Amino acid sequence: MNSEQEIRQIYTGWFKGTAAKDIDAVMANVAPNVISYEHDSPLQYVGIDAVREVCQHGFDVSDGELEWDIPDLQILVRDDVAISWGLNHMQVRQPDGTTIDGYSRGTRIFQKLNGQWQMIHQHVSYPYDLNTGQAKTDLKP
């Protein structure tokens, strides 16, 4: 298996972990000193414990079934560093049958540490409306 395939396999585990609301699966391959720019404040989350907490909070406030994928996932690998990017597609199926369906932007950086790819940085965001200053959470590709 080449490095790109290894990273795609990490994403597959994260997607499955999200669907199962399995925080340990979602945190697999996240470096201890990760820095993450999330959708909400603060400006950055530093360290795996902080990222674990914000991810767990996302699971806790989602009443329904979760699904996450990145249909256009791009991966570039050079030596022991890899960059991935694409549009995060999140769906939440509510208990009443309605579905919340949205996209955000995502970029993640991996480093091969002790023979294993680990995410050392991620940046997820929504574009914002210049006139209102509000996040544009309803955009579709």
Image (spheres, rainbow, N blue to C red):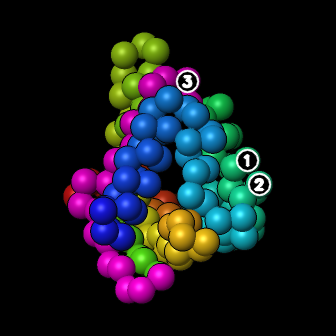
Q: Residue 78's image quarter?
A: bottom left
Q: Residue 33's image quarter?
A: bottom right
Seen at 42% across and 86% down, the residue is: 79
Compute the Cα span from label 1 to label 2: 6 Å
Is 63 inside the magenta-drawn segment? yes
Asked whether, in this view, residue 17 is left or right of residue 90, the answer is right
Disc 3 + disc 2, Cβ < 8 Å: no
Q: Which residue is mark 1?
A: 53
Q: Nearer the viewer, mark 1 or mark 2?
A: 2
Query: Eyeballing the image, is 39 above or below 16?
Result: below
Point out the residue furthest to the bottom here: 79
**Please, what secondary structure does the residue beneath circle 1 have?**
helix
- Residue type at mark 2 is Asp
Residue 75's spot in the image, x, y percent? 32, 72
Name the quarter where the C terminus is drawn. bottom left
Q: Can the viewer see residue 47?
A: yes
